[in-house]
Image (cartoon, helix red, strand yellow):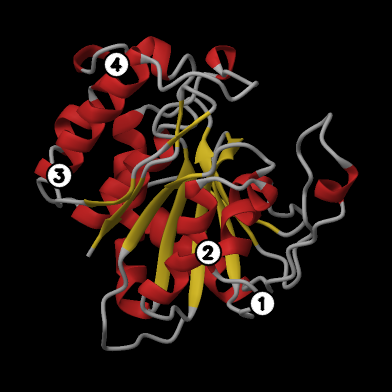
Amino acid sequence: MTEIASPQMPVVFVSHGSPMLPFEDIPARKFLLGLGAKLPQPTAVLCISAHWESPVARATGAAAPKTIHDFAGFPKALYELQFDAPGSPELAARAVALLKDAGIAAEIDAQRGRDHGCWNPLMLVFPQSGIPVVQLSLIDGGDAAAHLKLGAALAPLRQEGVLIFCSGGAVHNLRWLNRDGRGGTVDWAAEFDRWVDQKIAAGDAAALAQYRDQAPNATLAHPSEEHFLPLLVAMGAASNGGTGAKGKRLHDSFNLGSLSMAAYEWR
């Protein structure tokens, strides 16, 4: 990609919540609808979603990736949504090259579309913008340290006008959802969420990488790791291999009792 001098783009992490997010009348949706106006206008977006894991890092290389409706049992209107932001074969190639330069196996996937972890929040953040969006997979079986390294390898894109947009969940345990919407936030989820917030504010990448051992209620908060790993990618991209960049919480709310919708930014 053609490099631009400035400004350096921020790194953003959002919790994307339920696939119904575009239709939900909740604080997180309102926050996302206003987020794009608060960010520098990117030349392109590289999105890392919790919903794509691959044995090697893969980037969507199509010029017009399809919209993947990777869920079941939801209203018809959700399946009719189409994410029409263009792709960018150029950005996909650049991201793969950066990863390979860092010793990370990577390749372009010219067939895959973009899943709801990508389009669900981005269609709210940048509606009808025409900004190209490339999705990058997580590394299947890769641990927290591997995803910090993945993020660090992508950091040069920030100087090239690319917004690194990581989409997962600060707390994500679907078994504990209070689907009738009654009751407040469960204590264990709030405690884990506070711990994450403190470590991000302190720029403590080492603690976040060891969250399974250090954070309270880590197994409850994340029975599997895929929704937490995008946060590590964001931290790696923000720190650029350093000791840890301090992040700022942009949004703080819970949905369905235990689903944190926290969002963060690193500048």
Depth check, mark 4 against mark 2: the one in front is 2
Q: Give the labeled residue for mark 2.
A: 33
Q: CA distance from mark 3 to mark 1?
A: 33 Å
Q: Which amino acid type is marked by label 4?
A: Arg
Callout 4 touching callout 2 (CB < 8 Å): no
Q: Nearer the viewer, residue 229 or 88?
A: 229
252 to the left or right of 222: left
Q: Give the labeled residue for mark 4.
A: 212
Q: CA distance from mark 1 to mark 2?
A: 12 Å
* Mark sitting on residue 128: 1
* Residue under the image location 51 percent in, 40 percent down: 138
Q: Is residue 63 above or below residue 249?
A: below
Mark sitting earlier along the chain (3/1): 1
Q: CA distance from mark 4 to mark 1?
A: 39 Å
Callout 3 touching callout 4 (CB < 8 Å): no
- Please identify the quarter of the rendering in which residue 40 is found: bottom left
Q: Secondary structure at mark 1?
A: loop
Q: Position of residue 75 (x, y in %)?
A: 85, 39
The single residue placed furthest to the front in the displayed view is: 182
Depth check, mark 3 against mark 4: the one in front is 3
Q: CA distance from mark 4 to mark 2?
A: 33 Å
Mark sitting earlier along the chain (2/3): 2
Q: Residues within 10 Å of mark 3 (few under 14, many from 20)?
A: some
Q: CA distance from mark 2 to mark 3?
A: 24 Å
* Residue under the image location 56 percent in, 65 percent down: 92
Q: Nearer the viewer, residue 257 or 243?
A: 257
Q: Is residue 205 above or below residue 43?
A: above
Q: Give the labeled residue for mark 3.
A: 201
206 to the left or right of 115: left
